[in-house]
Image (tube, coloured by chain):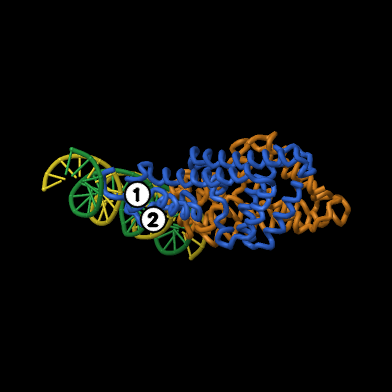
Chain colours: A orange, B blue, C yellow, D green
Amino acid sequence: MRGRPTRHSDDHLIGKAQEVFWKKGYTATSLSDLLQVTGAGSGSFYNTFKGGKKEVFKKAIIQRREAFDQFKQELNTSPAPLDLIKSFFRSIAEADKKEHIKGCIIANTVVEMSFVDEELELEAVNILKDVEQMFTDTIRKAQTSKTISNRTDPAILGRYLITFWCGLNTLRRMYPDKGALLQQIEMQLAVIS
Amino acid sequence: MRGRPTRHSDDHLIGKAQEVFWKKGYTATSLSDLLQVTGAGSGSFYNTFKGGKKEVFKKAIIQRREAFDQFKQELNTSPAPLDLIKSFFRSIAEADKKEHIKGCIIANTVVEMSFVDEELELEAVNILKDVEQMFTDTIRKAQTSKTISNRTDPAILGRYLITFWCGLNTLRRMYPDKGALLQQIEMQLAVIS
DNA sequence: TTATTTTTGTATTGATTGGTACAAAAATAA
DNA sequence: TTATTTTTGTACCAATCAATACAAAAATAA
């Protein structure tokens, strides 16, 4: 391939941009924020992302979807998939304060984008629905294999877990504290047993 | 009192501003948005709110706190306060689509302001904590009066309800639909019984 | 009436916004 | 080497941002 070598790979730019978007959200993140954190100049930046700020944000969101898809793969090969999901919830309590306050970038996006950008809103909503589907499927299997005794419709319990996830996204900011969060996580996970 | 009469009362300005903030959030709402929706000119606007955009937002938030305080008053004189809270949750399902997508301005603010404005973030967090306290107190009374049989620590159940409220704030955007929401609301309220 | 006070409307500010233009740099292909 | 291609860095752009300056308007007080 011809041309001057790239100093800033797409992944590097998206990764760094994601960090800022995760903290400040889409609207509050300025282009100069992105240029500063990535180290790229605006010429280089727009050469990479013709769609500008919105394109990078979308790619940052898609990167989170891919991380989720990878988790789903691990679930599929796990002997106890429901335990893996429960462990994931419990591990949230272990995060440090800054991570609590950042929350989940997908849930954040659903809240922020409602009347700001329809396309980005839908993208984020669809990811949450995929996560919900994963919850539902896993719970259904756990019911079939008699791993859990709760016989409530798995669709309702899956929706219960995604609601908990989104609630946790705010609770973590109210109480960015391991003890408080773990107590609530254990109480809510006990429903799925 | 001397001086030219006010065409735009504080309450009118705050009320109209609140509508825009509720939909678009703090950052995405521009001053010209506010001037357009209120009908005021920038001179008049800044004469009323020396603190500019931030002052109006704070007053819009405080107005929501006052609406909550009023609900708390009604709770205090109610013969069945827990039922009033449950009815409130159920009434959420009845809202129309636009209301679902707007969600709760306080929960929205907690999510948006994390790394944007510490003062506004704290203000919103404190309101949610007050709501949680109301949940906890009401549940404690219902346990004492043997209105409910669940003997879990009321602090945990109060925190459970505020987590549900915040989760609902995102679930409503995923499924702005009466049936889906009511099903989830009934399932989660059943825990408090 | 005249002086004073307050709100209103308009013009305008400087700073920041997202985004372009363009030439130099730095690689490969011919 | 020379031509071509792509990235980079800098200068710059129009539009919008939140906010101010200021005089006319419209009331009350003296």
Specify the label residue A28 is tagged with: none
Q: Given the image, what chain letter belongs to the residue carrying mark 1?
A: B
Amino acid type for the residue under numbered disc 2: Thr
Looking at the image, residue D28 sits to the left or right of residue B181; the answer is left
Image position of A13 with respect to B139: above or below: below
- Using residue A91 as the reference point, say whether residue D30 is left or right of it: left
Residue located at (69% from left, 44% from top):
B160
> In this orientation, which residue lies closer to the viewer: A81 or A193?
A193
The residue carrying mark 1 is: B45
Secondary-structure class at tag 2: helix
Which one is earlier in the sequence, the residue at label 2 or at label 1?
A: 2
Task: Examine the rendered structure and indicate whether residue D14 appears above or below residue A185.
Answer: below
Q: Nearer the viewer, residue B147 or D6?
A: B147
Q: Position of residue B26 (x, y in %)?
A: 47, 49
Q: Chain of mark 2?
A: B
Residue at 69% over, 63% down:
B179
